Image (cartoon, rainbow, N blue to C red):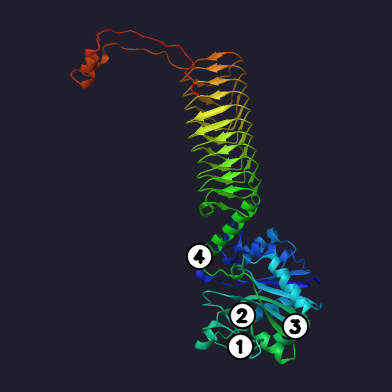
Amino acid sequence: MDRLEVAIILAAGEGTRMKSATSKVLHPIAGKPILEHVLRSVSKLDANQLRVVVGAHRESVESALMEIAPAAIPVFQAERNGTGHAVQLALADISTEGTVLILAGDTPLISSDTLKEFLSVHIEDENDASVLSAMLPDPFGYGRIIRDDFGNIDRIVEERDATEEERSLDEVNTGVYLFNLSALRKSIAQLSTNNSQGELYLTDVIALIKSNAGKAAVILSNDYTETLGINDRSQLAEAGAILRDRINDSHMKNGVTIIDPFTTWIDVDVVIQSDVVIYPGTALSGKTVIKSGAVIGPRTTLVDTEVESGARVIESQVTGSKIGADATVGPFSFLRAGTVLGPSTKVGAYVEVKNSSVGEGSKVPHLSYVGDATIGKGSNIGAATIFANYDGINKYQTVVGDDVRIGSDNVLVAPVTVGDGAYTAAGSVITENVEPGSMAVARAKQRNILGWVLRKRSGSKSAQSAERAGARHEETSVTPPGNGASE
């Protein structure tokens, strides 16, 4: 396959049917902007030059281009006067010869394999112009391919300019073209605005090339879904579902079990090893990596998260975290950015962890908040424990050592350290460091005031039950011992 000289992506449209303050080509699909999917496919053709025509939302599109494809050259179309005008601008300072690829920036499903095959046929057949066509079940809105009596392309007619007979045709122009640069330059200079829109149509170049004794051909796509463009939110959702199915199918063919592919959404850059099991209602996005043997879901969201082998994440939301081998998370856990769970750890029901590390074999089983903390190995954090890390101005660190037992309903007020092997009593508010091997008790002495209900709630159901149980009008104080931890 000869190398492509220039690739031009048309991304200047207003996208008014999206009804959005965001450029149409920047709306996300499978975790990436629409335009990035197109750029990724085109990049595989290794063109000498890449140009992107921008117009509406110029600043945001050019900013995205700098991040996605810094080598791309933006070309500004101040007045949107049609696709032919956009290509005229893109070619204005190009004097080289060779082949140019032109396609729309709102076709995220087009694959590099299809583009490579398209280019190969174009060059092999020595065409001056090649048009990629598709047979659509519903061709409404697309330009139609008009063939002559010999089956060759005669011209392309836009939907608005087509006759009723022409609109009945189901072979459409996909907006993907290959041209010989010299033939394109000559013909594009002859374009006129004699059409219903009063614009310069790139599609009219085909008839002009033929009239200039050039060779034009139609190459039919093997998969019409690759050529679908996006003009509104409904089409965005349709394209998203097609891409979801492609991505899921690829993972399943690589040894991943996806129980319900229709409710499993995986971004294009997610990496999943074989023998992972994914349950229904799961969304995996960003730079998430899941190692072999892990089980994810059901109803779980992972964003930019690494999950090691054998870990299980159930009905939880996780962002920017690392989950160690054979760890368990959930159900109903919330792991925020900066969370690192060591091997065989447990973060259980209704636990939130943020910017903290939990050492190997340690457990935070339920109903707790762990923020800005370091927990050592083999420790247990009792139910309803709060790591109080914020004083309203600054955030502070809490350190819990190895083999520590934190009692239920504790508050650890940072900055504070609980040494190796220490215990804290249930209901304690720990504000001072706890030495290794110590038992910290930080709560008021308990007083049981006997007879209080009989005196203060006389005649109530509680008082009646108390009397039946032998309650008397006496007073005393009792302080029960015990760590009171849960596991």
Closer to the camera: disc 1 or disc 3?
A: 3
Which image quarter: residue 439?
Answer: top right
Closer to the camera: disc 4 or disc 2?
A: 4
- Label 2 near label 1: C-beta < 8 Å? yes
Q: CA distance from mark 3 to mark 4?
A: 36 Å
- Label 2 near label 4: C-beta < 8 Å? no
Q: Position of residue 57 (x, y in %)?
A: 59, 67
Q: Which residue is mark 1?
A: 193
Q: CA distance from mark 1 to mark 3?
A: 23 Å
Q: Which residue is mark 4?
A: 233
What's the mark number on residue 82?
2
Q: Which residue is mark 3?
A: 128
- Label 3 near label 1: C-beta < 8 Å? no
Three-letter residue code for mark 3 = Asp
Residue 265 lies left or right of residue 217; in this view the side is: left
Which image quarter: residue 117?
Answer: bottom right
Q: CA distance from mark 4 to mark 2?
A: 23 Å
- Label 4 near label 1: C-beta < 8 Å? no
Considering only vertical position in the picture, is 332 above or below 15?
above
Q: Residue at x 24, y 15 (%)?
A: 466
Three-letter residue code for mark 4 = Arg
